[in-house]
Image: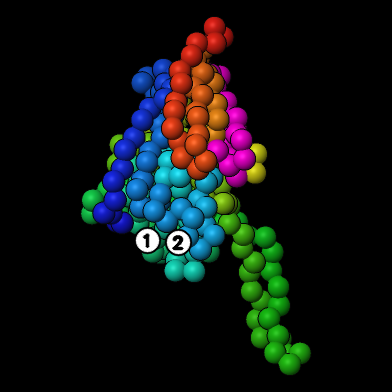
Amino acid sequence: PSSGGLTVEATDLVLPGRNGFDLKITRVYDSLASDAAYKDGDKRLINSFGQGWTLDLPGLETNDKGQYIKLQKGATYEVKWTGDRDYFSYEQHEGEHFRLEKFRRKTGEHEVRFLGIYLYTAEDWALDSYRLILKDGTQYIFNTEGKVAEIIDRTGNNRIKVEYAGKNITRMVDTLGREAKFVYSGDKIVTITGGGKKVTYGYDGANLVAATYTDTGEN
C-alpha cells in the first residue's frame, strides 16, 4: 500500500444505528493528497473539506497506470484482477485483508470481420458494479464510477445508502430512515445535518479552518 504521509481523522456526526451499525461521518486529512492537490490540474476536491481533507470512505480510481482501491484511513492498493466474463476478483492478505469483486453483464454480441470476411462472434460486456468485502464482513457496493453506493453490515440486514448529485454525495440514509444531508459551495462541503445536529465548515481559500457544531432541534 502507499504510505509515508501524515493522516489525521475527525468524526463530526454519528447517528446510532441498529446492532451498532452507525451512520458515521468521518473526515480524514492526508498530507500527501494535500501536497499533490493542485499539481497537474488535479484538484481532488470531490466530497472534500478543502485541501487534503476528504470523507473517510473507500473508493476506486482508474488512471493510465492501472486501477487502485483506496481504503478508509488512506491505504491504497493496486488492483490485479483475475476472472473472466461476468465476474472478476482481487484478494489482499498482507496488511489489510479484503476481497474486491467486479461484476459485469452481457449487453449483446457483434460479428468480428476482416476485409469483409466473418471471423467470429464476440460478446459485449458492460460494467455493472463492484463489491468490497472487509475482514469483519462489512461490504461496500460501488457504482460504475467507483464510488460507494451502499454500505452493508456483516449480517446483511442493515444498510446505509449513499446518494449523489453528479460526483458529490448529497445524502446518506440508513435502514431506519435516519439521514445525513450534505450541502456544498463549489466542490467543498459547507454543512452536514442529521439527527438534530448540524456541522458547519469554514474555509480560508482552499483550506479548512473551522468546524462548528450546533443543535437544530430536528430529528
2 vs 148, nearest the viewer = 2
Can residue 164 be seen here?
A: no
**Image quarter in which the N terminus is found:** bottom left
Q: Residue 64: x and y, percent?
A: 49, 69
For the residues bearing labels 1 and 2, Cβ distance under 8 angstroms:
yes
Q: CA distance from mark 1 to mark 2?
A: 6 Å
Q: Residue 122: x and y, percent?
A: 64, 74
Q: Give residue 115's mark.
A: none
Q: Residue 193: x and y, percent?
A: 54, 21
Residue 177: image quadrant is top right
Residue appearing at x 36%, y 30% in the figure: 10
Q: Give residue 78's mark.
A: 1
| Above/below status of 196 relative to 104 | above
User: What amino acid is labelled 1 in the image?
Assistant: Glu
Pointer 2 residue: 67
**Image quarter in which the C terminus is found:** top right
| Above/below status of 174 relative to 92 | above
Residue appearing at x 60%, y 34% in the figure: 184
| Above/below status of 99 relative to 40 | above
Side of 138 where 49 appears, left or right: right
Task: Tell me the crowding category of disc 1: few under 14, some 14 to 19, or many 20 or more residues within 10 angstroms, Cα based.
Answer: some
Label 2: state its secondary structure: strand
| Above/below status of 26 relative to 96 | above
Q: Main secondary structure of the magenta part?
A: strand
Q: Residue furthest left?
A: 94
210 vs 53, nearest the viewer = 210
